[in-house]
Image (cartoon, rainbow, N blue to C red):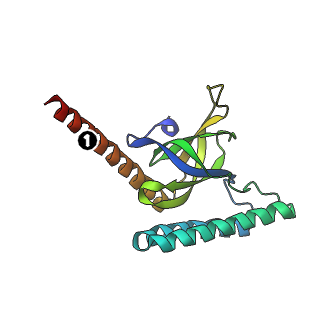
Amino acid sequence: MADNQRDFYRIQDRLLMAWRLADLEPTSETESALLALNRVLDEELLELNDDSPEIARVLTLLNRKIELLVSSDEEGSGVSTNLGGFCDKAHVDVSLSGSGMGYFSLTNAEEGAAVEVMLNLESIDVEITVRMIIIESRVSADAENPGFWLRGRFVEDQDKQVDAIVAHVNQRQFEQLQRRTQTSGAQTNEDS
């Protein structure tokens, strides 16, 4: 029951994102060290973004380039890890909250699978990578848009990433409230 509970503060949004399957537990010491280093690096980049967004953006791009090169090297050498590269980034409809997210995907992920999701949180101008466990996977009911609706819960110990998501959700809710206020104000003026 607790896994299926939803947060009150959530939004429907369209975000630039990519995702990939991840291992629940690292399969080697090197992978464990890389995952730990990436978590620390992501947290530091989030902090740096407050003071110097341009530098944080460049360093984030360099980190993604390194991840792609490592992923490409693993594929070329025949190293079999579950981590493969991220799918191509695309604008995707998402349901987002501080505890998890749902998103549409052409590729399925089984319930209980671990995934890493790269999100571009446009409202606060930050890109993050967050890990989550898939708690629901449904086949799309729309015959013209085949694929899957995946819903997951964020894993623990990602406080900075979740804080960034909550800041994005709050900003989007503020923008939505502002639009409603402007629309109702314009209607009031027309009625006068």
Mark 1 nearby-residue class (10 Å; few <14, some 14–19, many ≥20): few
Return the residue nearer the eye: 108 or 1: 108
In the rendered image, residue 69, in percent from the top left (x then y), is placed at: 73, 67
**Residue at 71% of width from left, 64% of height from top?**
68
The quadrant in which residue 37 appears is bottom right
Which amino acid lies under the numbered mark 1 shown in the image of this protein?
A: Gln
Quarter where residue 176 is shown: top left
Where disc 1 sits, the SS reads helix
Residue 93 in the image: state x and y as whole percent.
53, 41
* Above-or-below relation of 4 to 20: above
Toward the viewer: 107 or 34? 107
Residue at point 74%, 60% (across, down):
27
Find disc 1 in the rendering and name its residue: 182
Measuring 60% from the left and 46% from the top, which residue is drawn there?
Answer: 133
Confirm whether residue 78 shows in the render. Answer: yes
Residue 179: x and y in percent read: 31, 42
Residue 59 or 5: which is nearer the viewer? 59
* 73 relative to 88 in the view: left or right: right
191 left or right of 84? left
**On screen, 72 above or below 58?**
above
In the rendered image, which quarter is residue 187 located in?
Answer: top left
Is 17 positioned to the left or the right of 34 in the image?
A: left
- Residue at 47% of width from left, 66% of height from top? 46
Residue closest to the far right: 78
> How many numbered markers are drawn?
1
Residue 117, image x and y in percent?
A: 59, 52
Quadrant occupied by the C terminus? top left
